[in-house]
Structures are given as C-alpha cells and as structure tokens.
Image (spheres, rainbow, N blue to C red):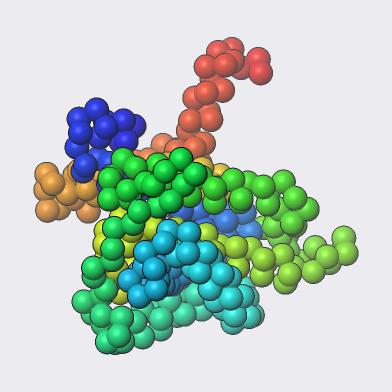
Amino acid sequence: MLFIVGAILGDTFFLRLATEALIFGGLAMSVDLLLGIVGLLSLGQALYFGFGAYLSAVVLKEISPSFLLAIGIVALASLVLGWVASFIALRSKGVYFALITFGLAQVAAKVVYNTRSLGASDGMMGVPILQIWTPFGSLDAGQPGTFFVITFLTIGGLYALLKYFLTTPMGSLWHAIRSNEDRLPYIGYKSKGPKQVAFVLAAVVASVSGALYPMLRGFVSPELMFFSVSGNAVVTVVLGGVGTLIGPILGSVLLTSFKSIIGTWTVHHHIVIGIIFVVIVVSAPKGLAGLFVRRFSKIRSPEGGE
C-alpha cells in the first residue's frame, strides 16, 4: 500500500518508507524464527543486522559496487559469525540466553563505535548507488521504486526460505523444542543441533536484511547495533504476531509508518506509538496476523460453520 501510494503520488518518501519497513521486517523475521518457532528470546539480533550493514558498505565501497557480491559475502560471513556465536549463546537457556545475546551485541556495538577505520561514532558514509545487472538489463538502485522491488524480492526470498524450513523435519523439531525441549530425547533427538541451525539461519536472515540498509540510505552507523534496534524488532514481532513469520512484516510496516508519519506531527510520537501498541496487543493478543486470520475466517464462515 505504501508503494502504491508513493508510485501514484510520485512521492519518494512513501517509497523509501516502504523499503525501510521491509528491511526491518527481515530483521524481525529472524527474531520470530527464534522466539516464535523455537522459543528462544534473542535480545541481540541487532548484532547481525549491523554486521550485515557494515560488511555490505565495506564491500560496496572498497571492493566493488555489486549487489550480488555484497549479498553473497554477507550471507557467507554471517553464516560463520552465527555458527561461532551459537557456541557461546546456546550454552544457556531462558533469560540467560537472552542476556548473552544482548551482551554479544553490546560488545560488538562498542567495538564498531571505537573503530576509526569503520568511521567510529560517525559511521560510514558515501556508499555508492548501485547499477544491478539482470538478464533484462541494468537496474538503477538509486530509483526508489526500483530498489523497493529489489528489496521486496530479497525479503520475499528470505521469507520463502524460512517457510520451506518449517515444512521439513527440522521445522518439526523446532516446534517440538518450543513445546517441550526436555522430552525431545525420548523420541531420539537432541535439541542442540536443531537450535544451532535455527540460530545460524536467524543470523543469516538478519545480516542479509541489514546488507540492504546502506544501499537504501547510503551510510551506516553504530546505532544499527544498539539495543534499541533489537528491542524494536521484538516489539515488531509481538505487534505482528509471534510465530507467524508474515506477522513481523506487517508489524514492521505499521511501526515504521507510525514512527515516520506521527513523528512529523509531534515530538512526543513515542507516547502515541506506545498507546497504539498497548491497544493493539490488548485487542489482538495474537497480533495483526492473528487478527486478519480471525476476520477472514468470519467472512468465510459467518455462522461459524467452518
């Protein structure tokens, strides 16, 4: 809807807003994979989002302004980073797991904040505008509408990947872990392997989403690794619907729109957004996705027959 409005009005504000909502929706999907599917609350997904953003900016500035090269390097590097971090984070459960992920993100943010080669507190600027090659011709990523479509396809690909995993035996094990991890050995499985796969996959999804950020904004900053980014992702998941994967996208669109649009009306927009968030959570405990499913079911079955 934001894209359609922006395209009709020719307003780049709505087009960029829609693109940003998708990017942060990808981050929220990674949180939902851990929280809603496996039952692991991560408070440090901003670590991977910021890592992907910085690595993408470095590749585009220092190596080559290539979209596929940046995404490929970020995906492979985040695979390794997530694998290493999983040995640290998955040594604990519950609130301790959340605190460890939070601590890892804080350490990484502080390191980036004090690294001059990465721009320190000022961040990295001057990320070049991409010309993306396709079999049908070159695409100018500097055009807001074009880059929205590219982002839509990229985040859509990540969504399809996660949905595919949920149809596999691995996805069944994730649900089993969330239901009752202690009983998993009784059916012949250990929980460590499936949890590690989910952790690494969530890191890749968050990093690839973050890789799109400097392509949109032309810069990156240490704030992308701060706790506020991880916290907003958790709020987005709760708002959209925990365990639905599509819910985080809906929540991200709503939250990003509220921040940008309400923020132009009043400096106290956080109060307004907080009130709206409380109202939505109270009226729709299963989030926006659950609300839409319930409304759709009522339309299909007015008398509750189906």
x and y percentages locating residue 214 in the rendered image: 32, 62
Quadrant location of residue 257? Answer: top left
Residue 56's x, y, as percent?
A: 40, 68
Q: Against 77, is 148 above or below?
A: above
From this viewpoint, is residue 261 visible?
A: yes
For the residue pair 147 and 200, the one nearer the viewer reads as 147
Apparent side of residue 168 relative to residue 259 in the rendered image (left or right): right
Work out whether 69 lies above or below 301.
below
> Which residue shows up at 51% across the image and 78% down it?
100
Residue 160 sits in which quadrant? top right
Instruction: Please state the total of marks drawn on the protein image.
Output: 0
Q: Is residue 69 found left or right of 229 in the rendered image?
A: right
Task: Name the residue at 43% across, 51% down.
Answer: 133
Q: In the picture provided, is 259 more to the left or to the right than 167?
A: left
- Residue 58, image x, y percentages: 36, 74
Image coords of residue 1 (percent x, y): 34, 32
Q: Which residue occupies 25% across, 80% down?
A: 119
Q: Which of 82 and 239 lies nearest the eye of the viewer?
A: 82
| Residue at figure coordinates x 67%, y 47% from the top left | 164
Q: Nearer the viewer, residue 54 or 286?
A: 54
Can residue 46 be seen by looking at this rendering? no
The quadrant the C terminus occupies is top right
